[in-house]
Amino acid sequence: MITKVWIVDKFVDNLESNPQVVDAANLLRENEVVALPTETVYGLGGNAESDEAVGKIFAAKGRPVDNPLIIHIAEIRQLKNFVTEIPVKAELLMAALWPGPLTIIFKKKDGVLSEKATAGLSTVAVRMPDHPVALALLKKCGLPIAAPSANSSGKPSPTKAGHVIDDLDGKIAGVLDGGATGVGVESTVVDCTEEIPVILRPGGVTKEQLEAIIGEVHVDPALTDEDVSPKSPGMKYRHYSPNAPLFLVSGTTAFLQGLVEEKRREGLLVGVLTTEENIGVIKADVVLACGKRATLETVAASLYDTLRSFNQAGVDIIYSEVFPHTGVGHAIMNRLQKAAGNKIITQ
């Protein structure tokens, strides 16, 4: 299969009539899969009503079939087609945060969406992306689109069209290149089928933001306790991993430097993921800055691109500093812990 690449200027008017967007929408209606930019990461989109299209998503990614997909829509009115009810708290969140990096879980109607898309669950995860190209594509095709991240399963999520090509060239019909994404980590997933909503995955919207809108919000215990089974099936798998083994390091700069020197004496090529504040302080074979520690949003925005850069550098082992569990730091640490397989070295 030849994978088409369409470069689309997200700032132009009338994106729905853009020839590249029209071409991609036609492919989606033909049950092909197309990668599209969102404000979080690039998604791999397919018709959520079609077993054929959803099957192609799983095949291209190599994704476990018990891992449900998020359904993307362009207009709230589409919800009534495939959810049984819209709770008041969900309405409040949608009014305040859609379009945006928030996925809401609803009870689903049977017989509308592909059972493959929802992994046979009685619920469905839905979001409205805050990206003009994504919204134009969703409106043009007129379908609910299932779209996990557009990468090989387990690898760092793509925040640039080039990342998608690296992983999926020849496996999908096309890629809409709308430039680099902004948020950099996936959407927050919140289950609104409970009386008190529950965060199942931290992401671009923080717990504090949610509680400012709807009051008390719980967090799935599995996010902090390895012995608890995650309520969200997709969270039980290792994700976001670079090629080399990754270790998180909780300790002083001197402690981290000592770990680096130990591995270099063993003849290993060592990489360090740090922040701009530590460039020139940490010495290793490959030292990459992942945003500014003082502004965690910049860390989130460049996290996956930095992890992928270590692949290009060919390092044997990677050490990463850890980040505070505040605000978007929850999402950053969730992704790093997944990427490291929870391997943390503490001073």
Image: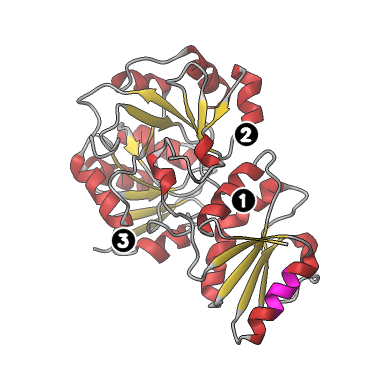
The part of the image, by quadrant, that contains residue 233 is top left
Judged by depth in the image, the label closer to the viewer, 3 or 2, is 2
Tell whether position 65 is magenta: no
Q: Secondary structure at mark 2?
A: loop
Any part of residue 189 in sight = yes
Q: Which quadrant, please, contains the N terminus?
A: bottom left
Left or right: where 242 falls relative to 32: right
Mark 1 vs mark 2, CA separation in Å: 15 Å
Q: Position of residue 257 (x, y in %)?
A: 74, 72
Residues rendered magenta in the picture: 256-261
Q: Secondary structure at mark 1?
A: helix
* Residue position for label 3: 3
The part of the image, by quadrant, that contains residue 134 is top left
Please name the amino acid that badge 1 sits on: Ala
Q: Of the two numbered discs 3 and 1 on the same chain, state the one appearing first in sequence.
A: 3
Q: Of the two numbered discs 1 and 2 on the same chain, state the one appearing first in sequence.
A: 2
* Residue position for label 2: 206
User: For the view shown, which residue lies furthest in the front direction?
Assistant: 227
Residue placed most toward the observer, 70 or 24: 70
Mark 2 is surrounded, within 10 Å at the Cα level, by few (under 14), some (14 to 19) or many (20 or more) other residues, namely: many
Please name the amino acid that badge 2 sits on: Thr
* Residue position for label 1: 301
Mark 3 vs mark 1, CA separation in Å: 26 Å
Mark 3 vs mark 2, CA separation in Å: 36 Å
Q: Position of residue 325 (x, y in %)?
A: 68, 43
